Image (spheres, rainbow, N blue to C red):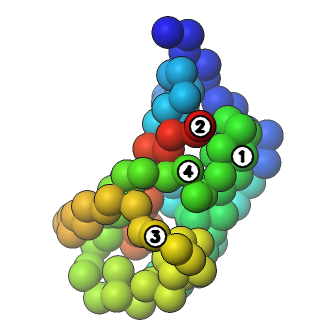
Amino acid sequence: MPKEVIIPKNVHRTRGYSHAYKCGNTIYVAGQIGWDEKGKLVGEGDVVAQTERAYENLKRVLEAAGASISDIVMMRIYTVDLECFNKTAEIRRQYFDKHFPATTLIVVEGLDEPGTLIEVEAIAVVD
């Protein structure tokens, strides 16, 4: 099965990892956080702003792989506080209007980048 590294042009550069890999019809997307195209955190201390940007980054990575948000079958959401997740429920509903993907929520002590409150990772399957 061929493997393809996905390098979207409209998402921040990575440092030591790939945004995604496409293996056959499955796309594995690395954790996306609230960074703009220049790698700057959006919404310091604002989980809603960070989540909106993380989902926009996720959408852009999937589009670069020939997929869309509706192709997501599995997500992992990492957050530093359960209340952060609760504040972002409406954003999830905007992206997943019919069915939510299988999802695991993981509350962590901290994320890789200082100030980051939430990170979303996904697996998508295209028909």
Tell me the residue at 28%/72% (across/down).
Answer: 80
The answer to whether residue 51 is seen in the rendering is no
Q: Is residue 99 above or below residue 12?
A: below
Q: Amino acid at mark 1?
A: Glu
Closer to the camera in the image, 38 or 4: 4
Q: Secondary structure at mark 1?
A: helix
Closer to the camera in the image, 9 or 64: 64
The answer to whether residue 92 is seen in the rendering is yes
Separation of marks 1 and 2 at Cα, in angstroms: 14 Å
Q: Amino acid at mark 2?
A: Asp
Separation of marks 1 and 3 at Cα, in angstroms: 19 Å
Q: Secondary structure at mark 2?
A: loop
Q: Nearer the viewer, mark 1 or mark 2?
A: 2
Separation of marks 3 and 4 at Cα, in angstroms: 11 Å
Judging by the rendered image, the residue that carries numbered circle 4 is 71
Q: In which quadrant of the rendered image does the C terminus lie?
A: top right
Earlier in the chain: of badge 1 and badge 4, it is 1
Earlier in the chain: of badge 2 and badge 4, it is 4
Badge 4, how many Cα within 10 Å: few under 14, some, many 20+? some
Q: In the rendered picture of this protein, how many numbered marks are placed on residues?
A: 4
Mark 2 and mark 3 in contact? Answer it, CB < 8 Å.
Answer: no
Badge 1, how many Cα within 10 Å: few under 14, some, many 20+? some
Q: Nearer the viewer, mark 1 or mark 4?
A: 4
Q: Is residue 89 above or below residue 125?
A: below
Judging by the rendered image, the residue that carries numbered circle 3 is 99
